[in-house]
Structures are given as structure tokens and as C-alpha cells.
Image (cartoon, rainbow, N blue to C red):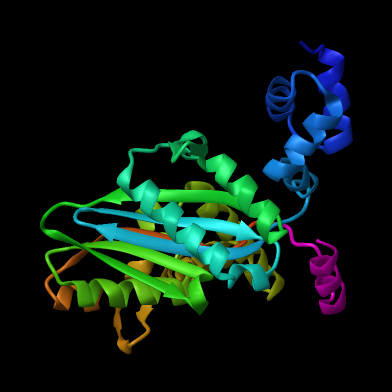
Amino acid sequence: MFKASDVKDLRERTGAGMLDCKKALEACEGNIEKSIDWLREKGISKAAKKSGRVAAEGLCEIKTEGNKAVIIEVNSETDFVAQNEEFTSFVDYLATTILKNDFKTNEEVLNYTDGGETINDKIVSKIAKIGEKIDFRRFEKIEKKDNEVFGAYKHMGGRIGALVVLSDTNEEVAKDVAMHTAAMNPTAIVREDVPNEVIERESKVIKEQVMQEGKPEDIAEKMVTGRLNKFYKEICLEEQQFIKDNNLSVKQYVENAGGKIVSMVRFAVGEGIEKKEENFAEEVMNQIKG
């Protein structure tokens, strides 16, 4: 048997999590040194030391099958690893696994057991093998109706992924809309989808800008509406100029093909993650040090 102090000691010496330390001590009958080796063999000790690093590179992957589709983002520390076959194969496997199962949260994905290992265990093994922090960041699973089609598009080798659903049209039109979504980064489909706090903040900014131009407050109030219309055309998918034909809005393009936009998801790798500033030489040295 082993004591709580043994778990604490093992955690401090390896950086591994409490549950992993308990597993190691159980497997090694409480022997600390053997437990350290056990954790190293499993790659857990090495992976734990990398857990505090920033992983803001990586890939988006999209999978569709029948009426189901999934888009995921998995992060790595560097773009070198994001292009590594070991990493890309794992991202592909993860997207396929999520597509075929009814997961609701990241935690459910990470705790899923496949081939005697949880997904989290597989990630730990990959970290040990590849030598960088790997982080399964997010996913979104979508189901469509029989009269709807998926449009999927990955840009910049998977750094941006877009998945859309259109009704009553064909996959070619849907893919065009997905491509547009990837390129133009709309944040809503229609005006009604834009959160009130976003509209209020933008209105305040516009009013301040107009007043700084020397316009009185009552005139500024009236000009807010006009400039908000321009703002909507920049962020709403249906109102954006279609990238393949600037004479059409995206809504017009889809309606001309008999369709309607149902939903839209766009992931960009690393968006919202605060990245460390490192120069190229330091990045390569970090790779060598592992």
C-alpha cells in the first residue's frame, strides 16, 4: 500500500496528475522509483511537463457522413507539428470517432475508451512521442434534414474550417458558401443573430466617431443607423458580397440556386488563444530540447 504523502511526492517529482500518480503507485506496489519509471514509460511524466505550454497552432478537420457532420480543432505548439503525419492522422481519427459517437462535451470525448485506452490517454502518448503539447480544443456536431446539404471547406491547409448547412439546393452551392465563410469570417447569418451587446457597443463607437467629426449629437444619432447598415453587411453572411460575384450578396447567390442558409460554423486555429512571442531560432531550439 501507499500513503497520500507518496502521491504528493510523486506528483512533485514528475509533474503528473494525481490520478496518474495513484495508478502508477498501484501498479508498482507503492515503490516511488518504479512509479517514476512507469510514468515515464507511459509518457505521462513528459507530457505533464508540457501541460503549461501554449498550444495555438494546429488543425481544423471536418467529417461528414449521411445526415451528420462534425468540425473539430486540435492544437499543437508549432506549425511544424501541425503538418506532422503523426499529428494529422490523430486529428483525422479524432474527428471520425466524434462523428460516429454521441458526444456532447469535450470531457465525454476525452473519457471515451477505444482499444483499451481513453482518448485522453492517446493524447498523452502522442505528446510523449511528438514532443509537444497537444490540446483537443473544441468540436461542433451538426445534423441535417434530408432536404438539406452540407458544405465543407478547409483553408490554408486546415488552419481555417467552415461547415454550413443549406436547404433545397446542391452541394456545389453549399461548398461555395463554406468557402466564402472561411474567407470572409461572418459572425452571424442574419441581423437578428447579432447579440444586442454587440449592436450597442458598435452604435456607441459610431456615435462617438461622428461627433468627433464635428456633427451635433442629434445628427450623430441619425447617422448611426446608416453606418450600422454598413456594419451588418460586413459581419452578416447573407448580406456580405459573394466572393465569386461581387454583384450578388450571399443570400442572393443561394436564393438564385433555390436554396436557403440554415446554419454556419467557422473555426480558425488558435483564435482567442494568447500566443507566446518566440523567434524562429528559439522555436527550433525548443524542438531540439523536446
Residue 132 inside the magenta-drawn segment: no
Quadrant location, the N terminus: top right
253 or 220, which is in the foreground?
253
In the figure, residue 23 lies in which quadrant?
top right
First to last magenta residue range: 274-290
Along the line of sight, the residue nearer the viewer: 127 or 173: 127
Q: Judge whether residue 277 can be spotted in this image.
A: no
Q: Is residue 87 above or below residue 114?
A: below
Image coords of residue 283 (percent x, y): 81, 71
Q: Which corner quadrant of the image does residue 171 belong to? A: bottom left
Question: Quick check: 259 left or right of 198?
Answer: left
For residue 165, say whether it is visible.
yes
Label total for image: 0
Where is residue 272 shown, x and y percent of the image? 64, 57
Q: Quadrant of the C terminus?
A: bottom right
| Side of 189 relative to 65 (left or right) | right
Any magenta on residue 285? Answer: yes
Q: Residue at x 78, y 30 (%)?
A: 35
Position in image of residue 275 (x %, y %): 75, 62
Residue 156 lies left or right of residue 81; in this view the side is left
Q: Is residue 286 above or below residue 179?
A: above
Please say if 66 is above or below 215: above
Q: Is residue 104 left or right of residue 4?
A: left
